Amino acid sequence: MKDSDLRFARGLVLVNGAVPAALLGWDAAHHQLGANPVNFAILTTGMSALVFLLLTLLVTPLRKISGWNWIIFSRRTLGLCAFFYAALHFLIFFFKDQQGSVSGTLTELVKRKYLMVGITGLLVMAPLAVTSTNAMIKRLGGRRWRALHRLAYVAALAGVVQYYMQVKKDVRQPLAFGAVLAVLLGYRLMVSWRSARPAPVAAVKR
Amino acid sequence: MKDSNKISGSEITDPAVYFNRRNFIRTGLLAASAVATGLVCRRLNPAATGTVDTPAIQGLTTPATNATRTAEAGDSGFRATDAETSLQYITHYNNFYEFSTDKEEVASAAAHFETQGWQVSVGGLVGKPRVFDLDDLLKISPPEERVYRMRCVEGWSVVVPWAGFSLSKLLTVAGPLAAANYVAFETLLDPKRMPGQRSRVLDWPYVEGLRLDEAMHPLTLLASGLYGRELPPQDGAPIRLVVPWKYGFKGIKSIVKINLVASQPRTTWSDAAPNEYGFYANVNPHVDHPRWSQATEQRLGESGRRPTLMFNGYAEQVAHLYAGLDLRANF
């Protein structure tokens, strides 16, 4: 792929990644967020974070299965979009729902278990965003960087679990997200299990 | 042979045209993908707006036409002084799983709900059981406007100018027998007209219940309208229950059956999740939902949350009903 094509493709992902935020901003400016705007904004950003997390986790399986190695270019942008929406999700909760009250937020965090799950997801994503640059990959070394970035699985799990716990009764949508995540993680388990099978032989040799 | 591979100069696309086409395709890709993404976003998370055009209710007693009633109503709790929530919000943010589990989709899903020929059966332990045509039922007492706070168990609230009359008027006509201790209510069961009933999200039909003394309390309202109009489908047309000191789910909608019974009837939400929703469901800021706090609420149309009041601010009128009852155990 030519450099200019790559740049364009990255831009394409970024523009699409900005669409949910742009729609939210537009609707907010035109007072079209419905009867419960804060709730709507929290829900939209949370859902966007989850969708981008799942898309991020889709890149590697898709690349291995299809042989389209070039799609790896999109992973970092998708991951950063996920972090951006997760952070926005929390900030709207903090500033709009809790009106910037630290004590109120902490009380809610303790009372609502699903908020703990959510905040865990956000906290594990922060180091991933920080170490997403080429320079950081070099500094950490590929092996350590990859190990660290397995935290993305934890973040996605936290996202799905939080969504499931927060829904009153109709869990169809969180279950759908959960099913997608199960496939994405199941694929990785299968791959690592397959490559791990010769390991006992190697252990004997040692 | 040698010349056949050679492309003559005139055949090479002019670089300007080539790059233009490239830019054209790129711009198209950008725009098309952004539009597609936008549509997916809208599909996943729609915000609802719409209009309400149900007929006006005739003969409604409103504060403008009956000033004395307003003056005395301070104690009755009939007219909350809170700012009324807009008709738009009240009619486009509804929990009515018979149509959709998405609060913002109920209005459109219920838009064509037909209530012609509606009947309500009133029976069980009563002296005069009867199946009422809706019109006859509504003639029992002239409609009054009651402005009530409504607090949803999910943590949001509205202030609604209802139209209706006290349930006690109907119960008195039916004549409860001495053995009657509770009132059991039932919503229409008709998956053709209520598409949400095709999913098993709740055990249909929706049922609710009150203790007889709660049902006889003057605040307990049988409502047939809001904002001076007949109830729009999404708010429980044609007739619903409103119990302002209890969480909203106690206010059963589109009622077809009212039975007086001896023992505590089962209720849909406490069947679905007994540890989360009780029979009483009195609004109580000190007893949290297992998964969230009930101390505050988001009043629709306000910025920021406000504290939730004991019995939703109706303690003066109803606290005596629960004297000696452990409200933590009987949530």
Image (spheres, coloured by chain):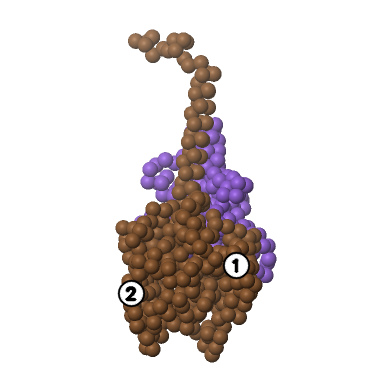
Which chain does purple denote in the image? A
Residue A97 located left or right of residue B112: right
Please state the chain letter of the residue tagged with numbered disc 1 in the rendered image: B
Relative image position of residue A39 (x, y in whole percent): 56, 59
Q: For residue A87, what is the image quadrant?
A: bottom right
| SS under mark 1 | loop
Q: For residue B87, what is the image quadrant?
A: bottom right
Give the labeled residue for mark 2.
B130
For the question of whether residue A171 can be seen, the reply is no
Question: Which of the labelled discs sits on residue B88, or is there none?
Answer: none
Taking depth in this image into account, of B299 and A185 the one nearest to the observer is: B299
Type of the residue with mark 1: Asn
Relative image position of residue A24 (x, y in whole percent): 57, 49
The verdict on a common chain for dots 1 and 2 is yes
Q: Residue furthest bottom?
A: B324
Q: Earlier in the sequence, mark 1 or mark 2?
A: 1
**Foreground label between 1 and 2:** 1
| Rendered residue at 46%/60% (across/down) | B231
Q: For residue B69, what is the image quadrant?
A: bottom right
| SS under mark 2 | strand
Question: Which of the labelled discs sits on residue B66, or is there none?
Answer: 1
**B253 versus A78 height, above or below:** below
Residue A4 located left or right of residue A64: right
- Pointer 2 local density, CA inside 10 Å: few below 14, some 14–19, many at least 20: few
| Rendered residue at 48%/29% (across/down) | B25
